[in-house]
Image (cartoon, rainbow, N blue to C red):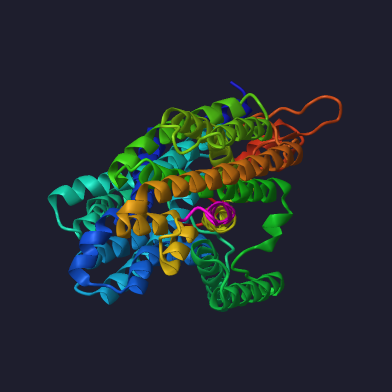
Amino acid sequence: MSSQSLDAAASRAGPKEWIGLAVLAMPTLLLSIDMTVLYLALPELSADLSPTSAQQLWILDIYAFMIGGFLVTMGALGDRVGRRRLLLIGAVVFGVASVLAAYSVSAEMLIVTRALLGIAGATLMPSTLALIRNMFEDPRQRATAIGVWMMCFMGGMAIGPLVGGIVLQHFWWGAAFLIGVPVMVLLVVTAPFLLPEYRSPNAGRLDLPSAALLLLTLLPVIHALKEFASHGPGTLSVLALVFGLGNGVFFVLRQCRSADPLLDMGLFKDRTFSTALGSMLFGVMAMSAVMLFVTQYFQMVQGLSPLVAGLWLLPSVAGMMVGFMVAPALAAKVRPGDVIGGGLGLGVLGFLLLAQIDAGSGFALLIVGQVVLGVGISPLLALGTDLVVGSVPAEKAGSAAAMSETAGELGGALGVATLGSVGVAVYRDRMVDAVPENVPAAVADSAGETLAGAMAAARRFPSEAPELLASAREAFTQGMNVAAGVGAVMLVVVAVLTTTLMRHVRPIGEETSRGGGETAVTTTGLPVQDDEDVVLQNRDPGRSPDGSPTHGT
């Protein structure tokens, strides 16, 4: 057996790493469940704690705000103090905060504990993904592992309402928070034995002023985008957006000048990294808004309960899981950019199917469109994440993982703010002359703004309800159709750019030079001149050529 074959075999993960992946999948699943499980608990929670409307919004949103605001900082911190150590610290804090949230005695206490849960969650997400980068040095195994990781994350968001519904049928609202405590205990007990430790040997001090600037960038921007989607542009939301973007400019300038930047701006010079990150941002942006419309369609147009609506979302999740598993296998034979582009073409078809739905279509076309969209978008999410994490040196994996997660957070917020606003604009246009004349002006204005407002008006004026609800549901569905059409156009653009800009990325794990003067490129994004270089570049930079560590853990 050649030395190259021996080195390749030595770099392949064994049973311990795959069991470790199962350990890493547990907090990933839990974090995504926590993003959606609270929606079903809100009525009972509100009756117990009596929060104001503003406090209700903070209870729901503060968790995602804190995760989005702290991801990059925690990714950089993990590179410095140790990714496993940060994961364990985050798990302990998450478990304690979960107990405190479950037994909150006031709305203010619940808001604070939800914020603490978000900060702890921000330590867990990049740590799990960065550790996968360390544990799976073989590119093909790493792509499969990231597919499993992504499958758990997306699956958790879908089953969150189902888990919440089951728990709340038998226990009080605080039990929704206690779901995560056993998971975190198991993580703390098993991680020291199954997960490796890694820290960057040359990392400098954590730049706290940059961390503050980043927080003051992301939180106002995400808040402003959510306000745009919910209420349209207002003075405070516009000021928040300007304030956040201004801080973002100062943040970038500071990173360019700093000897130890919180976020290495040089990463964006790598075409693989930048293309994959941008593609995920706009792909998630297109998908998130339309899926929000679909969820509302189930509940407000078809009249399903949140729990039953969640069940109808499971086929699309199953489609995504299939895509997450199939994409890495395809990318081992075909260029990842082509696999992503082909998947996005399938996603375009899914969007076009959703654009054909009307208020009386029923479920068949909607389910098919969802499944096709789920299968089509999954290669972008799985392979894009792998390309982002795999295109940087191992010591930068924490920052790269955090950037991948941040792109998803911003993509979701941007999608709801932009495509959501497009759908709302269509609804308002269709409802201009659709509200019956007998409905008072103030109520008519509310009915003309949102479908929820029309449903409230229908309850107040039962005699006008059939005509009003028919018009409102049709207007809402037309708004969803237009948003899906815009999403299809966005995916076409993303598919073309991704396929074109990633032509240099060879199939995953391919390690041979091509003829005709073309240099093979692995999924690390680095040009490979010969077989020996491939082995060295796929090995952890913290190891010598014989595989022994060159720095402490």
On whether residue 117 falls in the magenta region, the answer is: no
Residue 347, relative to residue 184: is it above or below?
above
Q: Give residue 19's quadrant in the image.
A: top left
Residue 316 point in image, percent of width and height: 44, 34
| Residue reaching furthest to the top | 1
In the image, what residue occupies the spot 67% across and 76% down?
250
Tell which of 270 and 241 is nearer to you: 241
Residue 463, relative to residue 260: is it above or below?
above
On whether residue 426 falls in the magenta region, the answer is: yes
Predominant secondary structure in magenta?
helix
Residue 524, relative to residue 67: is it above or below?
above
Which residues, given as a range, are shown in magenta? Answer: 422-435
Residue 69 point in image, percent of width and height: 49, 67
In the image, what residue occupies the spot 20% across and 66% down?
47
In the image, what residue occupies the spot 61% across and 29% down?
331
Q: Does the image show residue 201?
A: yes
Q: Give residue 54's quadrant in the image.
A: bottom left
Give the number of callouts.
0
Residue 541 point in image, percent of width and height: 60, 49
Tell which of 5 and 335 is nearer to you: 335
Left or right of residue 52: residue 452 = right
Q: Does the image show residue 399?
A: no
| Residue reaching furthest to the left | 170
The quadrant the N terminus occupies is top right
Q: Give residue 248's quadrant in the image.
A: bottom right
In the image, what residue occupies the spot 43% across and 27% down?
364
Residue 407 point in image, percent of width and height: 57, 55
